Image: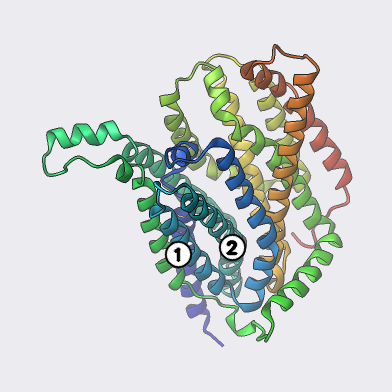
Amino acid sequence: MKSSRTLLETAERNIRLFIVFRTLFNARFYYPIFAIIFLDFGLTLSQFALLNTLWAVTIILAEVPSGALADLIGRKKLLQLTSTLMVLEMGVWAFAPTENATLLIVCMALNRILSGLAEAAASGADEALVYDSLKAANIEHRWSDVLDHMTRWKSFGFVIAMIVGGVVYDESLWAQLSMRWDAIGELPSDVVMRLPIILTFFSAIACWEVCRRMTDVKVDAVAASSAPWLASLQQTRQVGRWILSTPFALSVILLGAFADGTIRMFVTLSSEYYRLIAYPEFALGIIGSAMGALNMVCSPLVKRVVERTSLRQLWMVVGGVGCLAFLGVSFFIPLVGIVFMLLLNVAFSLISFSLSYYLNQEAVSSMRATVLSFKGLALNLNYGVMGVLYAGLLRYLREGGATDGSGDALFMASSQWFGPFYAVGVLVMLVATSKGKRKHN
């Protein structure tokens, strides 16, 4: 048995490493130019869409089995696998050839598969490792504080990545620097477009070192198995049954998946919204950084709201804020309309925080990572469903003659449907999950 002092030191170290890991794992320097960089590598828009579909399918297929595997073989091992996959993912992309179209698409497909596997492996394993160490040290009441600090640091890292990634991708800036300082020299275009990827590659290496230093306090309880994948499938089935028979956990996942998917669908289209409310393209990176900074400021407020309200009260807040935001964006108010995107961002933060807060408390240690993986699966599946529904809506509006057929008019018309859909959906979910009660406070 470890002493309480040793367990406390382990928990404190895991907290710090968890925050650093989440910050590095999510601070992707290519985010501000994500679609552009794929096209600059020589891919078409249709290839870009197919690659992202491949990424999403990989996550969906690997999400829950990887969480079950984390519960069975240890969370640290899954996190080490995550960071290794991230290193490989960025390495393949950083050295992908642009002169051979066939080899390029193969490399990018491999990149998307590795990225999906890394996302799936990370889902739930890091939170489960930290929460278990907090519980072992009898300080699990600090979990909301950990989430608060993690959110702030992750948002700070996101802001830095957005700014740095956008700057280093600017070829004209490097040309000006080379004219002023001969020591820099003129960088070839092929090198400049890889700089955000190379920076993320070094972040991946740092992630690997962070995961190596983590301590899995549940390693002594991990069952040895000659067939870990078979055991993971059995674990998946058992946890699936537990979720279905635990109204509170099921309520949290269903409510979270619906609200997350609806809001995320519109946020995905946010660049088009900003353009239609008169923001120039150069402002998009600044807006993205501002949203990240907002998360840092709002994180303590989100924490207090989640801690001091019941699930039903919380989702009434999420529903109200989301409805107000969707109503506001439907008017496309020039410049001022960004306020409603800020409200959507606040609702999104409440959803993300509450899912981690409630599910970690509700699940027992032996199934915690698997439960969190089911959460990730539900979010990704619902986001996919929302994409299909949105595509169907666009087709309906186009064929029904509701607009003049232009892309801008179609987007503006489709935006009118988000508010009513969200309001009715949240209301239905609240009624359907009204019997979901916690097993403890």
Residue 323, by quadrant, is top right
Label 2, residues with CA under 10 Å away: few <14, some 14-19, many ≥20: many
Q: CA distance from mark 1 to mark 2?
A: 11 Å
Residue at 69% from the left image edge and 23% from the top image edge: 415
Decide: is 296 above or below 320.
below
Q: Is residue 357 visible?
A: no
Q: Quadrant of the C terminus?
A: bottom right
Residue 119, by quadrant, is bottom right
**Residue type at the position of mark 1:** Leu
Residue at 81% from the left image edge and 36% from the top image edge: 425
Residue 263: x and y, percent?
A: 67, 36
Decide: is 297 above or below 4.
above
Q: Nearer the viewer, residue 153 or 79?
A: 79
Residue 297: x and y, percent?
A: 49, 39
User: Which residue is the site of mark 2?
Assistant: 127
Left/right of residue 266 with respect to residue 234 in the rendered view:
left
Residue furthest left as drawn: 182
Q: Which mark is residue 17?
A: 1
Left/right of residue 412 with respect to residue 254 in the rendered view:
left
Residue 393: x and y, percent?
A: 77, 28
Q: Nearer the viewer, residue 191 or 253?
A: 191
Mark 2: secondary structure? helix
Residue 162, by quadrant, is top left
Residue at 63% from the left image edge and 20% from the top image edge: 407
Decide: is 122 above or below 177.
below
Decide: is 116 above or below 343.
below
**Residue type at the position of mark 2:** Glu
Q: Quadrant of the N terminus?
A: bottom right
Sooner in the amino-acid sequence: mark 1 or mark 2: 1
Label 1, residues with CA under 10 Å away: few <14, some 14-19, many ≥20: many
